[in-house]
Image (cartoon, rainbow, N blue to C red):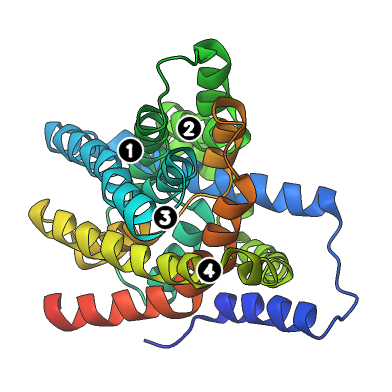
Amino acid sequence: MHIDVVAAFFLLGAIAQLLKAPLNMPKGLYQSLTMFLLIAIGLKGGIALASHASIEMLWQSITILFFGALLPFIAYPILLKIGGLSRVDSASIAAHYGSVSVATFAVALAVLEANSIDYEPYFPLFVAILEVPAIAVGLWLARDKNQKLNLKKVAHEIFLNQGVLLLVGALFIGWWAGERSDKLMPFFGTLFHGVLALFLLEMGRVAASRLNLLRTYGSFIASFGVMMPLIGATLGAGTAVAMDLTVGGTILLTTLGGSASYIAVPAAMAVALPQANQSLSITASLSVTFPFNVLVGIPLYSALIIEFMA
């Protein structure tokens, strides 16, 4: 499968930044696009959840919860032992790679819909579930017996940051309203791909603007930013097969396993682990892993899964 048209806008933004073109999106517009995507994904998943809720989905959700908790345990020793990073930095980055990128998920959704590939319509529920366990594991890995965490403040950042609040909130509204939510879909449904293209245009610019930090942090971060997504994607594919998901569902879980958070987790880690080098985490997840997944990972995952499952 080739690069989707929306992903081409990511390339455009990156090229514009590298050429030093004066392409700057207003901050308010970027925040609005982010909010739109979170609500659109959550609302669509909630509508599907209203008609697909079952015991099987409950067990699938529990499986997803354990899958999200497993990934940081894999990333942590790689960062600590091979990368030689500090315990706190290793735990912080591991939490980023155990959580997920909603933007990467949105690109995968766009690819599936463009190619008319069916998937479990309640998948946004799994996205919401995957936001939390990695943060908890990351904090446990970074624990210091002599340091007390402000659990109330950390919990507030985990569950009430913009990404989680809007995604989960829209999910519940869609589930509660059911078919009554259809009146919103001409806006949140029809415009989804266009909004995603604008969002990726800015993401390409931002990712390219941080490439110079890779010189500071060395080749290990660049290597880890590609290697860990492949490990997570492989585990995601295996989990999807064990859950007997559709081809589209397998592509989505593979993509989620290979993604890394740069919205929800940084907010939580900044409060819980202020001593961690947040620039290190963001550079790995945003400037390496996100571009890799958008330009290489999603087309690669899709092609392989379709080849072996179709």
Depth-wise, is mark 4 or mark 1 nearer the camera?
4
Depth-wise, is mark 1 or mark 3 nearer the camera?
3
Q: Secondary structure at mark 1?
A: helix
**Residue plotted at (51% across, 15% down):** 149
For disc 4, the marked residue is 288
For disc 2, the marked residue is 168
Characterize the local packing of mark 4: few (<14), some (14-19) or many (20 or more) Cα atoms within 10 angstroms. Answer: many
Depth-wise, is mark 2 or mark 1 nearer the camera?
2
Quadrant location, the N terminus: bottom left
For disc 3, the marked residue is 84
Q: Which mark is residue 209?
A: none
**Residue plotted at (86% across, 56% down):** 26
**Of the residues under marks 4 and 3, which one precedes in the sequence?**
3
Q: Secondary structure at mark 3?
A: loop
What's the residue type where badge 3 is placed?
Answer: Gly
The residues tagged by marks 4 and 3 sit, at their Cα atoms, a distance apart of: 19 Å
Q: Quadrant of residue 203?
A: bottom right
Q: Nearer the viewer, residue 125 or 67?
A: 67
**Of the residues under marks 2 and 1, which one precedes in the sequence?**
1
For disc 1, the marked residue is 49
The residues tagged by marks 4 and 2 sit, at their Cα atoms, a distance apart of: 27 Å
**Of the residues under marks 1 and 3, which one precedes in the sequence?**
1
What's the residue type where badge 1 is placed?
Answer: Leu
Characterize the local packing of mark 1: few (<14), some (14-19) or many (20 or more) Cα atoms within 10 angstroms. Answer: many
